[in-house]
Image (cartoon, rainbow, N blue to C red):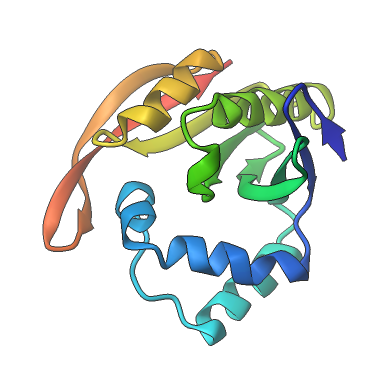
Amino acid sequence: MYQGKSIRLRPFERSDQKKYRDWVNNSEIASLVDRVLPVSDHEHEKWYSSIIENRNCVFFAIESIKPVKHIGAIWLWNIDSRHRKAELRVLIGESSAVNKGLGTEAIAMISSFAFNKLNLHRLYAYVLLKNARAIRAFEKAGFVKEGELREDRFIDGVYEDVAFMALI
């Protein structure tokens, strides 16, 4: 477990699955994080099993400290120990936790973990350009936009542009 000022990162547990599935099945959230709706119980269980078994992934639940509440998830994905880099993904699912700097704090905490514990050199993230709140959170945590991928994602019948962001 890793504790910050307002949040802690703890291992994602099987009991966290239902809340996480509810978040990714929320159409407003899904439209900002590139998810296809709906995610069935079976699909979610299959995804969870693949995460647990994946040695190139570190997955944490994000909990607020006061009050203690599971508010989201953050993970390092595609960890490449040879090139010392990984993709970072984050989801703040609780609407009461949005716009409070908690996403930025979680990004900063997992970045510190990645650089200091995993000895990584580079973190990167793909963020939908229309998700200005997420772009701001990454920038506040030190990430820079290295480029834009035009019409990179096809979501709800529309091609969406993606920001490619990184932290070294």
Work out whether residue 61 can be spotted: no
**Residue at the left extreme, as displayed:** 158
Quadrant placement of the C terminus: top right
**Residue at the bottom extreme, as displayed:** 42
What's the residue at 38%, 49% (across, down)?
33
Quadrant placement of the N terminus: top right
Judging depth in this view, the residue of 161 and 78 nearest the camera is: 161
| Up/down of 160 relative to 115, above or below | below
Residue 162 figure quarter? top left
Work out whether residue 121 can be spotted: yes
Report x, y in % for residue 129.
26, 33
What's the residue at 62%, 72% (across, down)?
18
| Left or right of 118, for residue 47 | left
Report x, y in % for residue 110.
70, 31
Judging depth in this view, the residue of 17 and 163 nearest the camera is: 17
Judging depth in this view, the residue of 140 and 75 nearest the camera is: 140
| Up/down of 27 relative to 137, above or below | below
Report x, y in % for residue 166.
48, 23
What's the residue at 71%, 26% (across, down)?
109
What's the residue at 50%, 14% (across, down)?
140
Number of dots carrying numbers: 0
| Up/down of 81 relative to 113, above or below | below
| Left or right of 152, for residue 30 | right
